[in-house]
Image (tube, grey):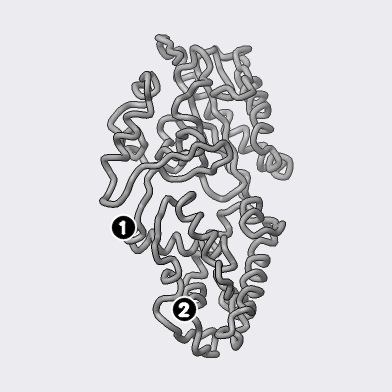
Amino acid sequence: MIISANSEPNRKEFNSLLDSTIAELSSHAKKSSKSVSKLLGRDLEPYVKDVMTDLAIGTAFENSIELIGGQKFPDIVAKKYYGIEVKTTTQNHWRTTGNSVLEGTRVEDVERIFMLFAKLASPIEFRCRPYEECLSEVVVTHSPRYLIDMNLEKGKTIFDKIKMPYDTLRKKENPIRPIVDYYKSKLKPGEDLWWIDHENSKASNLVIKIWTNLSVKEKQEVKNKAMVYFPELFSNSGDKFARLAIWLVTREGVVCPNIRDLFTAGGKGQILVGKKAYKNVPRIFLNLFDNLDFILETIGQTSSIELSEYWGIKTSEKKKIADWIELISLQSKKISDAKHLNVKQILTEIIAQ
């Protein structure tokens, strides 16, 4: 692992440069929001580099701003010492999967790295924080990676949790060991750590949990996601819980022996929409209607690209709620106990309330 013993040169002036960069990017977004919103992924890196280069004129960082590119970490380097890692999201949140814990591609001599995060959903916003201050957890794709949260409170980083500073951890010969030890110390009976060693695997928790160990809030959050991602839950298909069972383990790290009961236990009930009462409503639809606000929030925070993969149809940011309603409606028509329900109309009316 590459280590430098440099002191921090011109730190106050670099902080000022970062502040000016965020202000300038924000100004650009207000003037040309349409063009800035298209700067996804690596397209934003040269844009940020050019803004910083212009702002660095007359400072100690003039002619020192360098775009690294490729798979190197970080994306931009200033004076061969400071680094800027650029991340983007098209959703209205400040979280994403970050870089590898191992940092095998870290640029030589870079000692202080900052996270520049662009939220390209309306309203477009930019934030910048020291890298180590916004790393909340470690998740696993094909290797352990940091989870970035630009709203992370002070004292809540993964480094606070393992009681080891970022610079100490990254310089260790095996930086994974302290992280594994930390998660092992938090395991409950029946839980274990797991590892996904597949290039295309998506981020998942390190810990496998039993459903009964989840809090009431965590259980409902998982069920809300399931009702968004798997419309077949509202059908009479014999294998309607198959995809959900796999997703629970691979994406949420949860094992549930009785998945069917999560949505059907409790029998039928009644719901009042406006002035009309609907009786003999299957429990799965009661769960749907009762949690609709949280379900819509989940849809809003999930990209249309990801939803298209789950649903098997092409959707868009503008159409995803309407498409979800249509999918639920189509599946519900296959359930004999729900034939008296116009699910599409009910969902539309509840949303309009």
| Label 2 – label 1 distance at C-alpha | 23 Å
What is the x, y in percent for residue 207? Answer: 37, 45
Q: Residue furthest front?
A: 238
- Residue 154 in percent (x, y) is at 35, 38
Where's residue 236, x and y in %? 57, 75
Q: Residue at point 45% right, 17% down?
A: 111
Among numbered discs 2 and 1, the one appearing first in the sequence: 1
Q: Picture coordinates of residue 64 (x, y %)? A: 60, 13
Residue type beneath disc 1: Asn
Against 327, residue 312 (above or below) is above
Q: Pointers 2 and 1 in contact (CB under 8 A)?
A: no
Against 17, is 199 above or below? below
Q: Amino acid at mark 2?
A: Arg
User: Disc 1 on helix, strand or loop?
Assistant: helix
> To which quarter of the image does residue 222 belong?
bottom left
Q: Which image quarter holds the C terminus?
A: bottom right
Residue 283's tag is 2
Q: How many marks?
A: 2
Decide which of 264, 217 is in the foreground and name it: 264
Q: Quadrant of residue 157?
A: top left
Q: Residues within 10 Å of mark 2 (few under 14, many from 20)?
A: some
Apparent side of residue 69 relative to residue 182 in the rendered image (left or right): right
Above/below status of 318 relative to 275: above
Q: In the rendered view, would you say 203 is above or below 265? A: above
Query: In front: 302, or 293?
Result: 302
The residue shown at (66%, 40%) is 29
Q: Is residue 342 left or right of residue 83?
A: right
Which type of secondary structure does the marked residue at label 2 adopt?
Answer: helix
Q: Which residue is mark 1?
A: 213
Quadrant into which the N terminus falls = top left
Mark 1 Cα-neighbour bin, 10 Å: few <14, some 14–19, many ≥20: some
